[in-house]
Amino acid sequence: MKIINYNLIIIALLFVVGCSKKENNNQSQKENMENIQVSDYGVTAKDDSIKKYTLTNKNGMKLEVINFGGIITSLTAPDKNGKYEDVVLGFTKPEDYFNGNPYYFGALIGRYGNRIANAKFALEGKTYNIDKNDGPNSLHGGKEGFHTKFWNIEPVKDAKFPTLKLTYTSADGEEGYPGKLSVTVLYTLTDDNALEISYEATTDKATVVNLTQHSYFNLSGNFAKTITDHELQINADKFLPVNETLIPTGEQKAVKGSPFDFTVSKPIGKDINSDDDQLKKGKGYDHNWILNGSGMRNIAKVYHPQSGRVMEVLTDEPGVQFYSGNFLDGKFDTKTGGKNEFRTGFCLETQHFPDSPNQPSFPSTELKPGQKYQAKTIYKFSVKK
Ligand code: BGC
């Protein structure tokens, strides 16, 4: 009798625990969906209506993404007083994203982020000519790269944190690249104030792939201010010097003793105007750093002393393009007043090295049928008081 009673009690307890677990799961799923709002964003010249997805985490941090170019139009982060402000550059008018986005503000970049020399490469004995949109070279996948495409966006129902799944299929031959490429990107906003970006791609023919995210950051909360006072640290002992058209020469140069040494945190502006041939070629920093280590690791940290904002970058990629916003030219209004002037934003674009398809000594960017391209990057925000 006693045994039966115990059994009954255990069964009843398991039932109660099971129900409440289910309830918790449902509850967290429900909350996640409530934390993703969809609204109308704008209409393109071709009459396509674009949606905006707003993700909010439990601290009130917000990420805004549109289904044109997978563009991040806004991302907030707290300052030392707990004030959440937008920290990514962007346009004030939707049509400026739709009609060219000359700076690639906030966009998903593909099929090949960064430059490919002379807009061509050979693969399996065949030469491919890709779109020449940057002097003699191809930049960021060509004029009609992934930053100009409509991405299908779905909120992910069973995710732990608010997550968007973006998908795009790039046709065989698009912008000159071989193979039909199916791309999936996840944007997740975690409760520890991190934006996680996961990339996956598969192909039906051998091709090259190098996906990245082109958000420009300014942690000051005022987009009219330059970023030269931000303190940057990059975990890289070497970088890739470039030629006049910003193609790596192939040399892997030690940063030690040069303006390219960010192994110890220093203000971006400290050495930016040094008399240095590489800085002249890039009009400032516009180079790929060869990241120390491999696998998912901390690769960079940015600190803005006045606001106390800190951004850490983690990735499993071998390189990062640190670009100090040297081509920003004040032609557009910022979201906080004033113009997007020279060096009012910086990018830390995690990626494989530029021009890898033409440089056999660089890690390969080739993707074959049956293989899966996978990469992940995290931008994590915190404060230092
Ligand atoms: C490149 C710059 C280029 C910019 C375009 C960056 O990734 O490194 O050279 O001008 O993208 O916005």
Image (cartoon, rainbow, N blue to C red):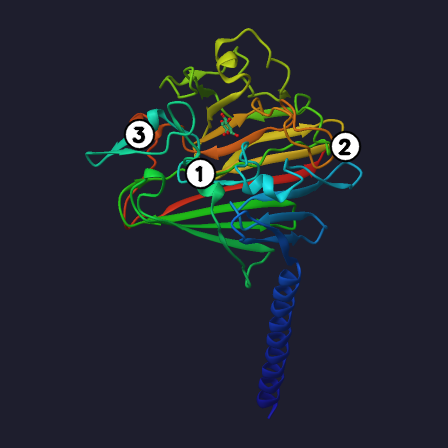
Label 2, label 3: how far apart the Cα atoms are: 49 Å
Circle 3 — which element? strand
N-terminal of the two: label 1 or label 3?
3
Label 1, label 3: how far apart the Cα atoms are: 30 Å
Residue under the point 64% across and 53% down:
55
Residue highlighted by disc 2: 385
| Residue at the far right in the pictured view | 81
- Please state which amino acid type lies under the numbered disc 1: Gly
**Residue 270, position as x, y percentages in the image:** 64, 14
- Placement of the C terminus among the 4 image quadrants: top right
Per the rendering, the mark at residue 104 is none
Per the rendering, the mark at residue 120 is 3
Circle 1 — which element? loop
| Residue at the far bottom in the pictured view | 1
- Please state which amino acid type lies under the numbered disc 2: Lys
Q: Nearer the viewer, residue 80 or 103?
A: 103
Residue under the point 70% across and 54% down:
58
N-terminal of the two: label 1 or label 2?
1
Residue under the point 56% across and 23% down:
327
- Please state which amino acid type lies under the numbered disc 3: Lys
Residue highlighted by disc 1: 295
- Is the distance from the Cβ of mark 2 to the nearest ligand 1 atom less than 8 Å? no
